[in-house]
Image (cartoon, grey):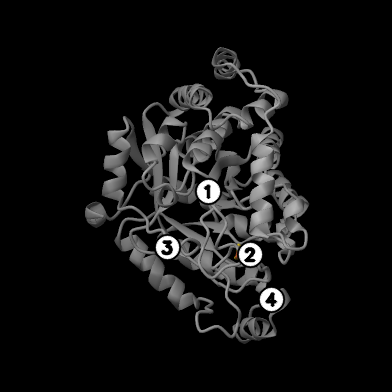
Amino acid sequence: MQDAKKADTDAATSSVPFALERKEVERWVADVVAGTRLERDQAEALTGQLTDPAIREALCDGARAIKRSLTGDRVTVSRNIFIPLTNLCRNRCAYCTFAKLPDSADAHTFSIEEVEEVVRGGVATGCVEVLMCLGDKPEVAYGSYRKMLEERGLSSTTDLLVDACRVAIETGMLPHTNAGILTKEEMERLRPFNASMGLMLETTSRRLRAKGGPHFHAPDKEPATRIKMHEEAGELKIPFTSGMLLGIGENDSERLDTLWVIADLAHRYGHIQETIIQPFHPKPGTKMHALSPLDDDRVVGWVALARLVLPREVHVQAPPNLGRGMLARLLEAGVDDWGGVSPVTVDFINPEAPWPALRQLRDDTSAAGFELFERGPVYPDWILERPDYFDPQVRALLPKYANDEGYAQRHNQSEEAA
Ligand code: SF4
């Protein structure tokens, strides 16, 4: 499977109909910087030439100009904790090491007491955001999980999430939930207990759901289902995080389509606060362990293209633990946010990739000519300019966690050494 996927990707990547001249690309980019939307056929032509240093540099120059026009030298990070509320999942994506089967020794669903304990650790180290990240609908697949919920007096994972988010707020942090596919009603229930929510679109490629593909055993990775949830989150006015996975077997055209769909959702609903451009890292023990990740040049090129394609209210994020050795290049490509970085918990999705220490991240950001600022689960411009995007209960909490400029206001400074 891996070889076939690699071949698909390479074939699409190399099918450049004609070679673009740098001057022409500079003209397109200048128009985008001035406020014109990049045309789809222009973007299609660019995707085939991201490995050309001159073309990539022109894209990065434009993307960085847009970033600077929005947030100047400032780059944000959210000092957070990550609670994998349950690592059971009804899907089996071919690249995942997060999801466990119920009989695995590593299978775990947090008790509310455990949630409270981890949140206390976050509060003690100056964290503002608690990321609730968990498997998709395990109650659909596993009787033992349904029984456990029943014993706790709960009927669904959403019940568990509501309890966990409520306790997190009471203990002193602001939740951001990424629980996979949720119905509109479920998101409505969670909105009063979440500052923001998210779902990586990952890819719009239906091809990857075919037999042998990475999403064959993952019904919740059906692109239409994920787009529908984005739309419903938009209808509910939830500050929303989306994202694109780079290198799971999709080709350039599919990558561009994913970006285009996220941009379209952001234009239609105005609720996409950030888009994560996340390079896939193959993991030992998975079916896709031998797949080559996308090379750094292409990752940088796709970050720049994302900044040029996405509306300006959408922040562009790259996880620093997945971009080791290339942070300066990511900043040059228009990244304005590093996402959540925890002094307390590991990245349970990519446990092989430790977070950088915040002090190191600050130094690296500064060495590239930018300045690191801490935010909470929502961006400063969203806090200051979009009060209608928050449930009244959350809106009332924001002044406690955000300063006058919307950046994180920490109540415990003891973590400065992180
Ligand atoms: S949906 Fe997420 S947690 Fe579940 S198997 Fe896929 S990647 Fe893993």
What percent of the width, then of the height, locates residue 173? 42, 58
**Ligand 1 is within 8 Å of the C-beta of the residue at disc 4:** no
Tell me how far mark 2 sits from mark 4, CA to CA: 21 Å
Q: Secondary structure at mark 2?
A: loop
Q: Pointers 2 and 3 in contact (CB under 8 A)?
A: no
Tell me how far mark 1 sits from mark 2, CA to CA: 15 Å
Compare marks 1 and 3 and give the one earlier in the sequence. Answer: 1
* Residue corresponding to mark 4: 139
In the rendered image, the vertical position of residue 166 relative to residue 386, given as above or below = below
For disc 1, the neighbor class at 10 Å (few under 14, some 14 to 19, many from 20) is: many
Given the image, on which type of amino acid does mark 4 rest?
Glu
What percent of the width, then of the height, locates residue 331? 41, 34
Front residue (pair 412, 60):
60
* Residue corresponding to mark 2: 94
At horizontal 49% and vertical 59% (from top left) the residue drawn is: 131
Front residue (pair 137, 116):
137
Q: Pointers 1 and 3 in contact (CB under 8 A)?
A: no
Front residue (pair 194, 17):
17
Given the image, on which type of amino acid does mark 1 rest?
Pro
